[in-house]
Amino acid sequence: MLLTWTLLIASLVVILAGCDLFTNGVEWAGKKLKLGEGAVGSVLAAVGTCLPETLIAILAIIFGKKTHGGEAIGIGAILGAPLMLSTLAFCITGIAVLAFSRSGRRTTQMTVNHRILGRDLRYFFIVFTLAAIASYLPRITHYFIAAFLVILYGLYIKQTFAEGGEDTDEDISPLHFFRRGGEPPLWLVYGQSVAGLGVLVYGAHLFVGQLNAVAIATGIPALVLSLIITPIATELPEKFNSILWVRRGKDTLALGNISGAMVFQSSISPAIGMIFTTWQLDTRAIACVVVAIMSSATVWAEMMWKKRLSPYSLLVGGLFYVVYLFWVL
């Protein structure tokens, strides 16, 4: 059992190393292509940090046909990410705003592009609700709903890039494959991104096997373990980028990094699940969807009704997460 936990932790280290390589490459790609902050925050950075969970879900589903609990791990990874993002990630961002305001680094007033964040959340409500409804429909409809979710995400990307916006002047760390500093060549940026993706695949494959072993040894359902462990271990560390952006007053980038990931994780990932699994969600899974939507609706409501966003509405997400955690366990 000790060896299993050791390998599980080792797999997370490999995943985070691959994610760091990939996201660093993606950030440089966005900078070299001179994309707006909405596109970088809501698409490039968000999708880059979504890869660990997505790969874990895909590999768990593939090997789930041969390994007991694989499908449950895959579905848990798919649903756990939107839950964590819409609750815990929002809460940590709100805490960061309050902490930096107390130290005098910024004020509690958040400068957010309501159009960008509001659009992200509306897409999230639609696609995640459709993903949950699909569980109650005949198997044949899952393919059509999956295709529709992919189309909606394509429309979301189109609108995000059409927004344009100011080019990001964000200072990013040197490319890991070009540590001497300066502007790295574009081919090296792409090369590092591909290498990071390869490391991610290996780490995700190792993680699935060890998580399944832990579930069997402890008697805790694989779905529950995956819902909780996978997103916190693989995506939450990357969302600490939002804390750095909040410190510098880049609130649109900070929240767009989270909300953009929410759209991806509630559309593309469920579409994969619908195609390659039975996509039969139990009470715990449906409750996960409901809690995620309720938490993000709190943020959306303040923006729409009061035309502002305060860190206090972000803190509510932490309460939603704790309540769900106690209930599911």
Image: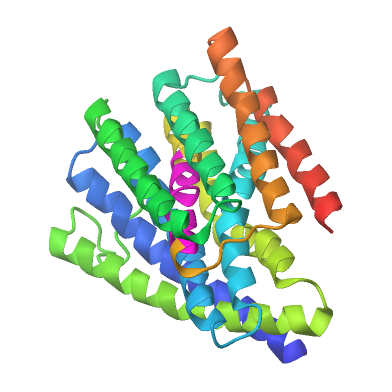
Q: Position of residue 291 (x, y in %)?
A: 70, 40
Taking 266 as reference, is 182 left or right?
Answer: left
Residue sitting at x 38%, y 39%:
41
In magenta segment, residue 264: yes
Residue sitting at x 34%, y 37%:
156
**Quadrant of the rendered image containing residue 93:** top right
Task: Reply above or below: 277 against 310.
Answer: below
Which residue occupies the extreme top position in the image?
306
Q: Is residue 81 visible?
A: yes
In magenta segment, residue 168: no
Q: Which residues are magenta?
A: 260-274
| Along the line of sight, the residue nearer the viewer: 123 or 198 | 123
Residue sitting at x 55%, y 88%:
66
Taking 90 as reference, is 16 left or right?
Answer: left
Q: Is residue 107 visible?
A: no
Chief SS of the magenta region: helix
Q: Count of labels shown?
A: 0
Task: Reply above or below: 213 against 292.
Answer: below
| Along the line of sight, the residue nearer the viewer: 291 or 261 | 291
Q: Position of residue 155 (x, y in %)?
A: 30, 37
